[in-house]
Amino acid sequence: MILGVQKVEKSYGIDTILKDITFRLEEKEKTAIVGVNGAGKTTLFRILTGETGADSGEIYLKKDAVMGYMAQNQQIDSTRTIYEEMLSVFEKILTAETQLRQIEQEMTQLSGKELSDKMENYAQLQHFFEQNDGYGYKSRMKGVLKGLGFSEEEFDRPLHQLSGGQKTRIYLGKLLLSKPDLLLLDEPTNHLDIASIEWLEDFLKSYDGAVLIISHDRYFLDKIVTKVVEIENKKSTVYNGNYSFYTSQKAIHREIQQKAYDNQQKELKRQEEVIRTLRAFNREKSIKRAESREKQLDKMELVDRPDSLPNHMRLTLTPRIISGSDVLHAEELSKSYGGHRLFQHVNLDIKRGESVAIIGPNGVGKSTLFKMLLGEVSSDSGLMRFGTNVHVGYYDQEQQNLDTNKTIFNEISDAYPTLTAGEIRNMLAAFVFTEDDVFKPVSALSGGEKGRVSLAKIMLSKANLLMLDEPTNHLDMFSKEILEDAIHRYEGTVVYISHDRYFINKTAKIILELSPDGVTRYEGNYDYYLEKKAERKRKETELQKQQPQAVQQQTISDTKSDWLKQKEQQAAERKLAAKIARVEKQIEQTEQEIAQADADMAAASTDYTKAQEIYEKKLVAEQKLEQLMEEWETLQEG
């Protein structure tokens, strides 16, 4: 074990932030700390690093273990260049290298015992130099810089010319090169494009030390961590698995606990009613029996009610005006700044109802392309046009035009005075603002909540084309799920820029990869994109190896070919009808299995192990039903 945390608590005044935080981290283990914004994740990191003291509890760090910590938006104040700043990590190696060159010069002037002593000193220093990667540190440093998105042409740029995000990447690079025994990383994928995130995944998976990560990047966590520590309502719960395992197990535990709680509450009410009836008889025996039942109730171990979650949206989000089938068309767009070309030969053809993700490395011009489409930036060449009745709603996470002096309800009602209170509440309910939540002041909202209000405003407008620039930035995981649901239920057209691969995988039906030489279109989600990229690379490799081969073809007469096609069509129609009948029967059977599982789970709610087994079987049946319904729809289409 490299780190142990036992019953850590932290409060600020009367506000308790953390209570009973307990977990352990083994050497070389990769673990995620998850929770909604404001749960106390960063506070926990500050306690672990000693920046903030805990009110109570114990923290154990292995003797002589070195801890490295990267906070969000970590800045560097320096007059050095990028290359010089990264070299500062290897100060001891650089000093040793200088001393070695100096000793080499001195040895040419010595002899006898002086030479012998100097050679022994040289051998010790040479051993230190080799043990600390003295011959490979420059190559390793360049690899990290390139992995984090810096080209060799940028190595000599002074740090004061870099953006805040670029400085954060430099700090991360220095931390990775220093190789601490325990890495604490707070949102390390912020400011990284997809290629850099994938590089960081590979680096951390093979990292020889332990890693503790705070991140809202679910795809990233799935690739790296083998343990998840959730902080919810000030307490910690440990799940041994990746992020997907954590979410599935959490859902199971919550449903089982809720059923157990509901059943116990019913029993408590029944017992209380019996006790009231016995006391109403007002006889000595009945009163004694009532008292006996009360004692049994006092001894009963109460089941805790699971922490409540906001309801997920249930509305279908339909634009007020339906656009034509052709939403956006562009031909041969290009853009350069000075002598630097961002992109050229960009062609787009987006239809109504499509959900499109635009991806590409940092600096390729994704946001510039967006602004070009919105008319905020001119194109160097090409043409573009929107279709009939297309109304654009633009969402930029960094520029939310919300009035902090208003409540959520007033923010919407003032923007759309013709809407009824019911219509406003229905839309806000879609983004999980219900009951008195709608009267919260905008100033009291988290970043994710403000983002959801902004989206509600856009969807209440005439917009039927949503253009979203990095919509998941700064959103917690719950808010990301709300946004995913909103896009799934939205009947208009959505085009967005994102580096959140999990979000892209969940919402995109089409991926447009932007490069300096144009756009490549993929008809699928992110997993499909990766599959096609790998397939293309594999085919290119095979083509290079293969020699041209003669292919023999067999011809069939036109008459015989037509006859065969007719027979095949008749057979296919019979086979299709049989398949439809078989699938319909399976759907009916599976629905019966799910209904039976619900009944069995309610009956076994006090038996946790049995209830969990039933629930897992129910999940399998529900997944099977969904697959069967999709198969049935496909078969109906012929």
Image (cartoon, rainbow, N blue to C red):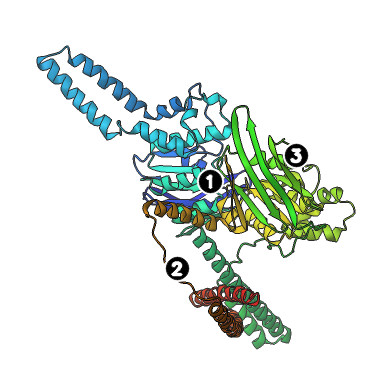
Cα distance, mark 2 to mark 1? Answer: 45 Å
Q: Earlier in the sequence, mark 3 or mark 1?
A: 1
Q: Where's residue 169, x and y in %? A: 51, 36
- Foreground residue among 270 and 577: 577
The dot on residue 553 is 2
Q: Where's residue 146, x and y in %? A: 45, 36
Q: Can residue 302 be seen by looking at this rendering?
A: no
- Foreground residue among 523 and 249: 523
Which residue, given by chain and number where applicable, does mark 3 sit on? 375
Quick check: 160 above or below 456?
above
Q: On the image, which quarter does residue 478 sit in?
A: bottom right
Q: Can residue 220 be seen by looking at this rendering?
A: yes
Which residue, given by chain and number where applicable, does mark 1 sit on? 194
Judged left or right of residue 155, residue 39 is right
- Which residue appears at 54% of the width and 58% of the height? 528
- The local crowd at label 2, few if under 14, some if 14 to 19, many if 20 or more residues have their Cα within 10 Å, is few
- Foreground residue among 215 and 11: 215
Judged left or right of residue 366, residue 547 is left
- The local crowd at label 3, few if under 14, some if 14 to 19, many if 20 or more residues have their Cα within 10 Å, is few
Q: Are marks 3 and 2 in contact (CB under 8 Å)?
A: no
Which element is circle 1 on? helix
Q: Nearer the viewer, mark 2 or mark 1?
A: 2
Q: Are marks 2 and 1 in contact (CB under 8 Å)?
A: no
Amino acid, disc 3: Gly
Which element is circle 2 on? loop
Quick check: 594 above or below 242?
below
Q: Where's residue 558, x and y in %? A: 55, 76
Amino acid, disc 2: Gln
Q: Nearer the viewer, mark 3 or mark 2?
A: 2
Cα distance, mark 3 to mark 2? Answer: 54 Å
Cα distance, mark 3 to mark 1? Answer: 27 Å
